[in-house]
Amino acid sequence: MHSDILIKNGHIIDPSQDIDVVGDILIENGKIIELRVKSSESGVKDNSKLKTQNSKLKIIDATGLSVLPGLVDMHVHLREPGFDYKETIKTGTMAAVKGGITSVCCMPNTNPVNDNETVTEFILRKTYAEGACYVYPVGAITKGQKGEELAEMGMMKDAGCVAFSDDGRPVMSSLIMRRALEYSKAFNVPVISHCEDMNLSEGGVVNEGRLSAQMGLKGIPSASEDVMVARDIILAELTGGRLHIAHVSTEGSVRLIRQAKERGVNVTAETCPHYFTITEDSVKGYNTNAKVNPPLRTQKDVEAIIKGLKDGTIDAIATDHAPHHRDEKLQEFDKAPSGISGFETALSLSLRLVYEGILTMSQLVEKMALVPARILGIDAGTLKVGFDADIAIVDMNKEFKVESEKFLSKGKNTPFEGWTLKGMPVITICKGKVYDWRIDE
Ligand code: DOR
């Protein structure tokens, strides 16, 4: 049963309607039915009085809070089927909702791999039964993510896949990538490329440079990413396919994507909060919670990524939420799996870009909600009347300490443990349910 909800006096930020002003939102049956702004500056009509006579109306006083469209995270790992000990659809989607995220795209590196419609349907059924937020599966490009034979992209699209990727692994064969991009054009779905030349990265566990030498660890050069970004841009040009570059970590990638966009190539790109917040220095002391693929890079790369976010080269911010079991991360550095549990810190880390004056709040919402929804072709990332009421209400001034023990995700693997961050979702509304996180404090 959906209750009707009135969000009052919040600072509504919705780039899809060019709204950045105080107002009210009325929700009925899980849909936004009215949005009233208190000033007409934004160009949106100050519409008629909200219908507030309804006695069963739940009123949320959002005075002093920011009201955003629920975030759309286009790159996550929910680990089901097969790796329930790391995360499940239930725990992962609850952690997402805690982070203000109401739609996620789950990568196919599960067991079995999501390379056929049976697995896609399983994920959707599980989401229907247990998911706190919307889950959009990403199908594998190749069978078993082996890079050898194309998966049945058409059938998986019909079953509900919104994009294709072999994430976790690259598609090393240029011919197979060419075909995948040709299909992406025919089916009008993006191919999300995990750019890594495995011949260059083989055996590597951290960024290649002075630090990897000092630590006695095998490095992954930036070139391993850059080479594949260049190849995929060339293949996108050849095919006219829809290329999306995942988790951009290097200065070189940003430059290549910028140049490609200038030439009019059909390419979009995402990065993750860890790539614009911390450097390879975080792995010092052999901290496996900072081991991620692609690896954390240098300050120069961080600065290039921030510049790319600012000038529009990088379209989206995704978490690459990659939960792993504590025991796996307790192994020695070489053996520990790569990944960061990102849902519950992503918005707060990204808000630093706003506090530092790099992005406006509206630009941040574009990158974390509107643009990913557009790239994926899903109805989300907006507060327009008629759309689902997926909403994040954020206290921009609230400070909190990152304590992974309190994460709703099973994955406690974060390099941000103990950090004090500012700005966090205090209420998330998704699928007609209101989660008030203040109650748990
Ligand atoms: O760090 C990573 N973890 N990078 C990937 O590409 C895959 C992911 C995972 O599945 O754990």
Image: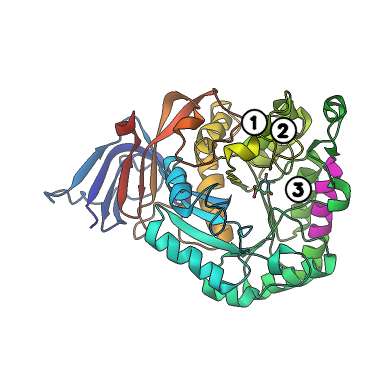
**Where residue 211 sits in the image (x, y, percent)?**
83, 26
How far is the residue under mark 3 from the one under mark 2?
Answer: 16 Å
- Left or right: where 304 falls relative to 160: right
Q: Earlier in the sequence, mark 3 or mark 2?
A: 3
Magenta-drawn stretch, dominant element (helix, strand or loop): helix
- In this view of the protein, can residue 18 be seen by the observer? no
Above or below residue 63? Residue 50 is: below
- Left or right: where 277 falls relative to 410: right
Q: Quadrant of residue 251?
A: top right
User: Which residue matches tag 3?
Assistant: 258
Q: Earlier in the sequence, mark 2 or mark 1?
A: 1
Tell me the amino acid under the disc marked 3.
Answer: Arg
Residue at point 80%, 47% (across, down): 225
The residue segment tinted magenta is: 221-233
Q: Is residue 140 or residue 42 the one in the foreground?
A: 140
Q: Quadrant of residue 145?
A: bottom right
Tell me the amino acid under the disc marked 1.
Answer: Thr
- Left or right: where 143 falls relative to 360: right
**Which label was assigned to residue 277?**
1
Here the colouring is rainbow
How far is the residue under mark 2 from the one under mark 1?
Answer: 7 Å
Badge 3 marks a residue whose secondary structure is helix
Residue at point 85%, 40% (across, down): 221
- In this view of the protein, can residue 98 be seen by the observer? yes
Question: Could you tell me which quadrant the C terminus lies in?
Answer: top left
Tell me the amino acid under the disc marked 2.
Answer: Val
Q: Are marks 2 and 1 in contact (CB under 8 Å)?
A: yes
**Where residue 57 sits in the image (x, y, percent)?**
17, 48
User: Which residue matches tag 2?
Assistant: 302
How far is the residue under mark 1 from the one under mark 3?
Answer: 21 Å
Above or below residue 113? Residue 273 is: above
